[in-house]
Image (cartoon, helix red, strand yellow):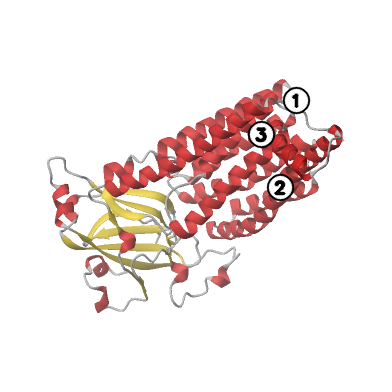
């Protein structure tokens, strides 16, 4: 069996790996600095530290309600509850579980979220100082249609419902920034009312992220740099992608260049569709979610096809089967209702987790271990455990399969961090954006050396 050729001096690759770790660390602390800047905001008021009252239905009187305890509310969340507020979690949710994989139109319902919050004199003075602050609100995620009131005054409305009670245009958005007039805020107690319209069984009906949700200086909220960063990273992905596609047409025997280029472009599409930037192009988020779902399915397939072509020269049967599954799911979610497409995404997640484990274990780890064993046999030296460990570490830097394994470990570790963060810490740091960027740059270096 042919051994993978070395791709260059291991010290060079070690420096590249060190630069990558530093890059991701800088990105991490950049995210922390953004959190610190948010806390330095003179107007910053964390809505998660207040109680949240939830009630089915909506009446105009709720917008100016001042004491929810005088009325009957279905659900009360204590301060710092750290939970998403979804319609399907309401007490006595009717039939949400039975609508899973139902292709028909879902029943549209509505409910009201009431959140009281306090503003002290210092924050009110900041609104009317010599350098006045324009207040704004940041919502990590809200959908499917909605209206927002502060002290009885409407500050935002995304309501598109026809006479039959059907949603005609969806607004399930991430990272929503809303400016409003400072005259709507009072010293002392204030009242936020959010009117939600959507399908009870929809995954994006309500405040579907656990946080952050806060009121602050709109200038700081809207200039967080996230949009610029997303556009910059996606531009880099597109450049890398088209460059390697061009290399493939110059030398068609290297099909891994084509697959690498397709994977890079799909990453750009996915991260762009996942970010609030896309709402400037597609206002109806039904379109953006379908694009995001298709890109997510295909980029995993393109990554596996790239790795298998690079390591084995052909696609394995599990990858072909996964590709066929993706084709079926993408076609179904393109023609079905948006809620049915969301259910298909849940099915895809189950299949994708198992398939990614296969990619990491077979296409990456197995290929590297096989290379190390071949190299040990070729060198015909002492087969002791210490020497084998040294050979393992050396191969990690000076072999194609070792580089791929090291890069995959970085991506997996940052993915685990993002999963733990979303489950326990709820901060808007997405390290996988940076780790995938580092992965793409280093793999471009590997292909260039190859």
Res. 390 image quadrant: top right
Q: What element does badge 1 sit on?
A: loop
Above or below, 445 relative to 222: above
Image disc number at residue 359: 2
**Residue 3 point in image, percent of width and height:** 82, 33
Res. 445 image quadrant: top right
Above or below, 163 relative to 95: above
Q: How many marks?
A: 3
Of 425 and 444, which appears nearest the observer? Answer: 425
Of the two numbered discs 1 and 3 on the same chain, state the one appearing first in sequence.
1
At 59% from the left edge and 56% from the top edge, which residue is drawn? 345
Label 1 and label 3: CA atoms lie apart by 13 Å
At 56% from the left edge and 49% from the top edge, which residue is drawn? 415
Q: Is residue 195 visible?
A: yes
Res. 226 image quadrant: top left
> Where is mark 1, residue-wise?
252
**Residue 11 point in image, percent of width and height:** 64, 27
**Residue 381 point in image, percent of width and height:** 84, 35
Q: Judge left or right: residue 32 versus residue 107.
A: left
CB under 8 Å between discs 2 and 1: no
Q: Judge left or right: residue 240 versus residue 398.
A: left
Question: Which of the image's four quarters has the C terminus?
Answer: top right
Of 430 and 65, which appears nearest the observer? Answer: 430
Of the two numbered discs 2 and 1 on the same chain, state the one appearing first in sequence.
1
Of 12 and 69, which appears nearest the observer? Answer: 12
Of the two numbered discs 3 and 2 on the same chain, state the one appearing first in sequence.
3
Q: What element does badge 2 sit on?
A: helix
Q: Nearer the viewer, mark 2 or mark 1?
A: 2
């Amino acid at each position: 069996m042919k051994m993978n050729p070395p791709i260059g001096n291991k010290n060079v690759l070690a420096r590249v790996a060190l630069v990558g770790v530093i890059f991701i660390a800088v990105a991490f602390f950049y995210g922390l600095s953004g959190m610190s800047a948010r806390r330095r905001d003179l107007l910053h008021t964390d809505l998660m530290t207040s109680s949240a009252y939830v009630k089915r239905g909506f009446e105009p009187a709720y917008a100016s309600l001042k004491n929810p305890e005088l009325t009957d509310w279905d659900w009360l969340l204590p301060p710092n509850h750290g939970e998403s507020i979804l319609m399907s979690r309401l007490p006595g949710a009717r039939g949400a579980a039975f609508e899973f994989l139902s292709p028909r139109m879902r029943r549209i319902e509505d409910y009201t979220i009431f959140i009281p919050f306090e503003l002290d004199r210092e924050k009110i003075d900041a609104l009317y100082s010599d350098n006045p602050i324009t207040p704004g609100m940041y919502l990590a995620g809200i959908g499917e249609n909605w209206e927002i009131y502060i002290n009885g005054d409407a500050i935002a409305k995304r309501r598109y419902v026809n006479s039959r009670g059907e949603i005609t245009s969806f607004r399930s958005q991430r990272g929503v920034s809303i400016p409003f007039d400072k005259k709507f805020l009072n010293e002392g107690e204030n009242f936020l009312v959010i009117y939600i319209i959507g399908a009870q069984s929809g995954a994006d009906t309500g405040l579907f992220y656990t946080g952050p949700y806060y009121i602050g200086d709109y200038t700081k909220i809207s200039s967080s740099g996230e949009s610029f960063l997303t556009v910059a990273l996606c531009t880099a992905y597109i450049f890398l992608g088209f460059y390697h596609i061009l290399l493939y047409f110059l030398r068609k025997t290297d099909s891994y260049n084509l697959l690498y280029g397709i994977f890079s472009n799909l990453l750009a599409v996915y991260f762009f569709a996942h970010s609030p930037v896309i709402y400037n192009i597609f206002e109806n988020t039904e379109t953006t979610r379908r694009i995001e779902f298709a890109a997510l399915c295909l980029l995993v397939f393109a990554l596996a096809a790239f790795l298998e072509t690079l390591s084995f020269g052909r696609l394995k049967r599990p990858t072909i089967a996964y590709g066929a599954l993706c084709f079926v799911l993408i076609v179904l979610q393109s023609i079905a209702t948006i809620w049915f497409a969301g259910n298909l995404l849940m099915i895809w997640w189950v299949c994708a987790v198992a398939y990614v484990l296969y990619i990491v274990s077979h296409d990456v780890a197995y290929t590297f271990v096989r290379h190390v064993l071949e190299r040990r046999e070729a060198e015909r030296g002492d087969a002791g455990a210490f020497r084998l460990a040294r050979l393992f570490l050396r191969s990690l830097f000076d072999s194609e399969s070792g580089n791929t394994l090291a890069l995959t470990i970085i991506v997996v570790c940052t993915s685990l961090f993002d999963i733990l963060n979303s489950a326990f810490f709820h901060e808007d740091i997405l390290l996988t954006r940076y780790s995938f960027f580092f992965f793409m740059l280093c793999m471009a270096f590997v292909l260039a050396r190859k």
